[in-house]
Image: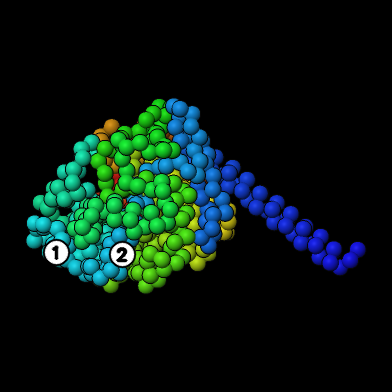
Amino acid sequence: MKPSNLRSQSVFVLILMFAATVAVRADKVDDYVRAAMQKQHVPGVSIAVVRDGKVIKAAGYGMANVELNVPATPDTVFKIASVSKQFLATGIMLLVQDGKLSLDDKIGKFLEGTPDTWKDITIRHLLTHTSGLVREAPGFDPLKIQSDADVIKTAYGVPLVFKTGDKWQYCNVGYFSLAEIIRKVSGKPWGDFLAERVFTPLGMNSTRTTTMTDLVPNRANGYAWSKGKYQNADIYFALRPSGAFLSTVNDLAKWDAALYSDKFLTKATRDQMWTPVKLNNGETYPYGFGWQLEPAGNHRQVRHGGSLPGFRAEFTRLVDDKLSVIVLTNGDGANAASIAAGIADRYIPDVLPNRSVAKVDPKIFDPFVGQYQPNPADPTFIVIVSREGRKLMVQEGTDAEKQELLPESETDYFMDDEPLLTYSFIKGENGLVTELAVMRGKQQLAKAKKIK
């Protein structure tokens, strides 16, 4: 056989080996996603895996609409909730690049009638959740359509939670305010501004502001799992700038590709958006402008999740590896961030944290046993912690399945299939357990007060 034929045969064998590797990897991803859906009671999931701006896997699993038996696909339209924050931040940064505003402008320059307590708050503080404003405006009503300005004004009389710049605390009022600033400065509705400057040029034809009245092709329905079956999730008629958009994984993959170029945001702007915020005491917190910045193992990561009734979303970018994973779901019980991390871990090793179980005396579990209330406004939802022999169990709602909490220390616990989350039991000055906090890295996702 001629050398040229040998070389051709070798190339052909390599191609077959590569194809087999990709197929195995894809099968592992598919199996992983389906297993997560079953455990988390998620009707439908769409994913996109993007390497260096190119989609290497896009898939849909389960049902976009359970009642009509419509399957989920990469073109299924989901509410992306707070994944939207990066687009509001992008709108602000486009105006900064246009020279129409500065990050250090006081927000009172743009918002009418702001109270004296808001006088030191800048646009930068709003972007980074360091303003000290209350998380939700008291006048927000999910069933009522109101202007952003009217919703913001209902927060004017609420005292600051902390001195501006002292701490990081997630704040949706801040992103309502950013949306109103975009409207004021651009002279057009913030949704129209972002469509004109970002979505339309990129061909993100399925991305738009959330609506419950317009006809939206390929729209997913949202679901909650209760008493062993799916039910339709609550519907928000209000448009929240903090969780503004509908989109698809294919559309978001186009945005991911654009973030490798200077077409919309310059490198200097992107670097600013992906730099941890500096607090008044000089310490930093891993949040930039609409992006969370905690690492994934030893990998640099910029990401954001989102949560609205019936929907959970995650957009993860492992920047140095040039790998992104986008996960959109239509189930209240979905942990989209964990699903995305698990997918990424199948392409890049060591993305998931290596959690280890500590040896502890099960007697230390006894003070943790009881009932915890996350939201006093909803006294019916209770988190139940129990001890079953040598195991500590948690049940998030009376209808939920019990899951084991594994000790990483005497106060910090995790679940075997949810390695991103830490359940921390907090003691008061008297040494008794008073609260249960759920953490993702440094970010507190929820806190529940012990009531029994």
Q: Residue at x 49, y 29 (%)?
A: 69
Residue 167 spot, x, y in % from top left: 25, 62
Disc number for residue 4: none
Residue at the spot of label 1: 109
Choose top left, top right, bottom left or bottom right for residue 212: top left
Residue at the spot of label 2: 94
Q: Is residue 42 left or right of residue 245?
A: right
Eyeballing the image, is 373 above or below 49? above
Residue 81 spot, x, y in % from top left: 35, 47
Q: Residue at x 50, y 41 (%)?
A: 73
> Disc count in the image?
2
Choose top left, top right, bottom left or bottom right for residue 16: bottom right
Q: Mark 1 and 2 residues: CB-CB less than 8 Å, in contact?
A: no
Q: Amino acid at mark 2?
A: Leu
Eyeballing the image, is 146 above or below 264? above
Q: Pick whichever, 272 or 208, lies toward us.
A: 208
